[in-house]
Amino acid sequence: MKPHYDSLFHNAKDYFFIVFGLALYALGFCAFILPHKVVMGGLTGVGTLVFYASNEHIPVAVTGYVLNLTLLAIAFKIVGKAFVKRTIFGATVVAIMIGWMQPIFMNLHKPLMDDITISVVLGAIMCGAGVGTIFIHNGSSGGTDIVAAMVSKLSNVSIGRTMIFVDMGIVSCSIFLPFEGTFAERLEVRLPIIVYGLVVTYIISFMTDLIINTNRQAVQFTIFSREWRAIADAINNEAHRGVTVMDGMGWYTKHEVKVLLVWCRKIESVTLFRIIKSIDPDAFIAQTKANGVYGKGFDTMKVKIKKKHIPTLPAHKAEEAAHPYRPEEAPNLAGD
């Protein structure tokens, strides 16, 4: 029964951090980006376009949620049931969060921060941190993720490239928002807003990658110590990491030694140093970065295995393959 409780705990923890990430995303958007009329990428950006094009009558949350459900209905057979379930949860929560926060910050007499540059950068950092938190806990907020997932399933275009093109198109559409004046005046007013939208989209992408990669960074410890048994036991029991024991020889002393190899997350490094120092302050330790560690307790290899091509045989060859000639089964024509 223990695995069941462990699984339940991890699922509850994942959903807690997914909700936290969605709340952080909604706060960054509603408090710091939306009040300055900056259109960013994703379906939230489309919702912003509709919100200001409708003279602030159609909330961002309504547009985003309707589009999310529409895209999921289209993509259901392509992206799979698991992706759809996860995305429906994320899209519902983020719609509730934005729907609740938008009136609070939009009804203020002025934006929370007057300086548009500082405001949108801070909002983008919060949105990116939220999205990164969602992703590392196997969540999804929908949006252009759905479009990118469909395109990657149906073509060789990468997800990242698809999202860049879609988001740039959404941000560029802010030039068509209602404006009283000539086209030249419209360009003069809207171009800086478009630039801010592109900056916001880039920062969100950068922060998302930073959060994901920081969580996945792994390091390798090579440990030489006479107290290797106690250190290995402590790493197993306290840090909950595996230890590999190898035989070695110090060439200067010609003495045999035991070498401990440990792989762990970068954020767990301090824990390992404390364990080792508390047992043997004189231990020799080498810490190196690992480009990638895959397996139990670390990342999962996400590669597609090519299917072996089985050539189609002609009809007569297929018949021969199905009924091969065996000399021992042939009729005895000599009458023996």
Image: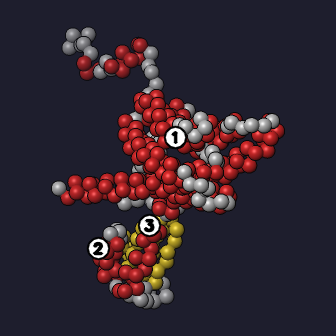
Q: Is residue 291 above or below residue 98?
A: below
Q: Residue at x 45, y 69 (%)?
A: 267
Q: Are marks 3 and 2 in contact (CB under 8 Å)?
A: no
Q: Nearer the viewer, residue 241 or 210?
A: 210
Q: Residue at x 51, y 49 (%)?
A: 102
First-in-chain label (1 vs 2): 1
Query: Residue 59, labelled with which disc?
Result: 1
Q: Which residue is mark 2?
A: 237
Q: Quadrant of residue 282?
A: bottom left
Q: Mark 3 falls on what kind of element?
A: strand
Image quarter where the N terminus lies is bottom left
Q: Residue at x 26, y 10 (%)?
A: 333
Distance of mark 1 from mark 2, alpha carbons? 52 Å
Q: Mark 1 falls on what kind of element?
A: loop
Q: Which residue is mark 3?
A: 265
Q: Position of residue 247 (x, y in %)?
A: 38, 76
Q: Position of residue 124 (x, y in %)?
A: 59, 55
Q: Is residue 329 above or below residue 211?
A: above
User: Which amino acid type is marked by label 3?
Assistant: Arg
User: Which amino acid type is marked by label 2?
Assistant: Asn
Residue 61 visible in image: yes
Image quarter where the C terminus lies is top left
Distance of mark 3 from mark 2, alpha carbons? 16 Å
